[in-house]
Image (spheres, rainbow, N blue to C red):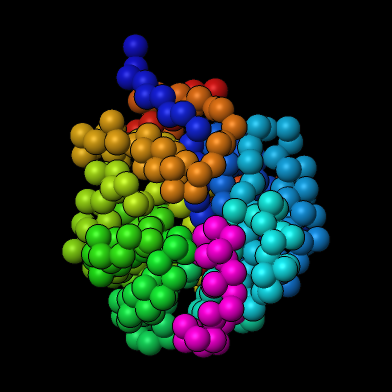
Amino acid sequence: MSKTFTIKNPLDMHLHLRDNDMLNLVAPLTSKTFSGAIIMPNLVPPVTTKEAVVAYKQRILQACKGDSFEPYMTLFFQNYTKEFLTDVKEDILAIKLYPAGITTNSETGVSSMDVETLRPTLEAMSELGIPLCIHGETNGFVMDREAEFMPIYASIASAFPNLKIIMEHITTKAAVDMLDIYPNLYATITLHHLLITLDDVAGGMLKPHLFCKPIAKRDEDRAALLNVALGAHPKVCFGSDSAPHPKHKKESCGCAAGVFTAPIALQVLTELFEKHNCLDNLQKFISDNAVRIYGINPPQKTITLEKVDFKVPQNYQNETEIVVPMYADEVIKWSLVN
Ligand code: DOR
Ligand code: ZN
């Protein structure tokens, strides 16, 4: 009999589901196996009102076709009043801040990261207990953008000690080191940043399906991420940043940023943690830490995997959309048991 492994209530704390036909294509690929996910608000236009949050959540639940799955909704950061935030608090789990223009659909993000400019909204969030998720990159040289953002994390974390701040999709040792300095800083880590470096993206033939923001960094950075993920550091949790783009927008000059990992995440994480003899820590990395950090109570779901080869499909498609997953057409050593 093949070896099996069981995960309870897997959570993806950073997920892009998009809208319309793409939403209908990708949502079930997460809702089938995950208990819940934090849903990113970078639609066009971005999600900035209570009505938009509620309506988007309904569309997501409809796309999940009855799966027991909780979409944890977010607002796109802008200056919000305390009154508005009080009213919307029950409908969201966090607010996501994008520096303006830093990545896909972030043009209307924040143009100044100055603490005083952000203070009224952050103060209200802190008082109401709404966590702040940040895409932490400057617009400097692409390999240095995340490291250059560390002083900004430091200034916000010390100005608002009661505000939970999640450094999203960290890619550097510099960000890992911040976790032990500021008690209110946490992090999500993607699957792809545990597996690849810039060499995999651009060291040989260019791999558009591995191009994302933040760009994958150096091997020492990946090693630092692996160290805290495999060790299930209590301040990190899994957030795939699975970011589907239509195939023609990836395989094009002017390639959109984003790696689509939703349908392979559980299988590849199991393979990775097993390879490093850390399978015992995967439950914490993929669920327990997030439950504690966010204080949530996700739907109960038990997922079993078996050590049987899984050939990743070349693509996933419906009538109008086609999207290529990471490791398309390659073989993973673990499969989901249906
Ligand atoms: O690679 C990325 N894709 N990084 C992001 O921050 C956004 C995402 C997207 O929405 O496509
Ligand atoms: Zn993202």
Tell me if residue 23 comes above or below residue 185 in the rendering.
above
165 and 231: which one is in front?
165
Q: Residue at x 53, y 80 (%)?
A: 119
Tell me if residue 254 comes above or below residue 47 in the rendering.
below
Q: Residue at x 56, y 36 (%)?
A: 298
**Based on the displayed image, in which of its 4 quarters is residue 76 positioned?**
bottom right
229 and 272: which one is in front?
229
Q: Is residue 245 visible?
A: no
**Based on the displayed image, in which of its 4 quarters is residue 97 positioned?**
bottom right
Q: Residue at x 37, y 24 (%)?
A: 5
Examine the structure image and report whether residue 221 is included in the region drawn in magenta: no
Task: Count the numbered circles shown.
Answer: 0
Residue 254: image location, x then y, percent: 54, 78
294 and 328: which one is in front?
294
Residue 329 lies left or right of residue 249; in this view the side is left
Residue 52 lies left or right of residue 310; in this view the side is right
Q: Residue furthest top?
A: 1
Residue interval drawn in magenta: 109-132
Tell me if residue 15 comes above or below residue 99 in the rendering.
above
Q: Quadrant of the C terminus?
A: top right
Q: Quadrant of the N terminus?
A: top left
Residue 174: image location, x then y, percent: 25, 70
326 and 140: which one is in front?
140
**Based on the displayed image, in which of its 4 quarters is residue 130 positioned?**
bottom right
Residue 304: image location, x then y, percent: 45, 24
Q: Is residue 287 visible?
A: yes
